[in-house]
Amino acid sequence: MPRTAAAKAGPPVSAPGPDAGGRRLPRTLHPLAWWIWALALATAVSRTNNPLLLFLVLAVLGYVITMRRTEAPWARGFKYYLYLALTVVAIRVVFRAVFATGMRPTDHHLFSLPHIPTPDWYAGIQLGGPVSLEALLSAATDGLRLACMLCCIGAANTLANPKRALRVLPGALYELGVAVTVSISVAPQLVQSVQRVARARRLRAGRNKGLKALRSIVVPVLEDALERSLRLAAAMDSRGYGRAGSATRGSRRLTGALMLLGMCGLCAGAYGLLDPTAPKLLGLPALAAGAVLCLAGLRLGGRRVTRTTYRPDPWRFAEWAVASCGVLSAVLLFVNVGYDPAALNPSIYPLSWPTLPLVPAAAVLLAGAAGFLAPPPGKPVPYVTAPRTEEAA
């Protein structure tokens, strides 16, 4: 066979090389950097219920995901987290309207629901009655804050590869990390299954809509989930998941004792920092001692787990920059410098229009800098085949 076919196919397709203009090479960011960024932003969200700042956080999340998500299946499920966030806000508002807490003389009355009398032992909870504008706005802002925190976790699941995140866990937490990774990846896999089934229905000219189409979608998705679980169980069993290992009983007991004492120290230290009346020894000393004991337990427990890494994930300047953006955003919202702390939680009783404080807004926008500080994600390499020639035919 002549070799003209390969010559006419052009140069081989490969990953993009260094650009002469100094542009960064496409690569996937370290998953731990995305998780630090997302958890820090969720911590900053817990500090405020200002709707202007919360909507700004959602805009920042949308920008970063649009700029730096990959073409992987788990990177397409952020819209479902948005649906979940809207559901959380709606449930919060409905519950606040049904379980009314009464009205103040200065409240703005909107409507009234039929009042359902409750027994004496159910005192303090009112079903139905007048509903005020202040009550609904309070429920909406609380639900919006929780929705933003859920979207932060969804952004981490969208941007970070869960399989690569498993590699960076300590050896003692490897099996626990496998379980957490499997539970986290359930939602993206279900999304992928639903999309595949819906695509197959469109190709087969499925005309059923609404509740009639539910059966034709749910049954294949459940079958696919069962097949995935069986394949996963077989793969985990072949790799020795859950094995006893070579650790002695004494080392396992020592590891458990160190972890238990360390967690108790962390809880006591956190309580000492939050309670100003607690003894000083329950603050930073207990927190530091608990952290040391936990690290010692992880170090001792990780000796019995031997792992090899074929392609280690590098931690470079981009990872430091992305993680620092999220951490600095949380720090600026917790340190009341340059702005009024009351602007983070605008008053609803009495009702007042929220203002956008400049320093917290700049902190949220700083978290959005991860959208261009992170390297661009690599695109899938297309498969190119050589055209057949007359000689090859």
Image (cartoon, grey):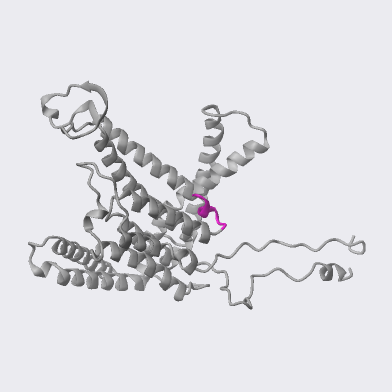
Residue projecting furthest to the right? 391
Which portion, as a residue range, is magenta?
71-77
User: Relative to 62, is 14 above or below?
Assistant: below
Viewport quadrant of the C terminus: bottom right
Residue 26 seen from this side: yes
Above or below 120: residue 319: below
Q: Quadrant of residue 300?
A: bottom left
Coordinates of residue 292 in the picture (x, y in percent):
23, 73
Give the residue at x 14% y 29%.
122
Q: Nearer the viewer, residue 133 or 264?
A: 133
Residue 74 on image: x %, y %: 51, 53
Residue drawn where x is 33% and y is 48% of the image? 51
Residue 120 figure quarter: top left
Left or right of residue 262: residue 183:
right
Left or right position of 257 against 42: left
**Magenta span contains residue 75:** yes
Residue 166 in view here: no
Q: Quadrant of the N terminus?
A: bottom right
Q: Is residue 291 magenta?
A: no
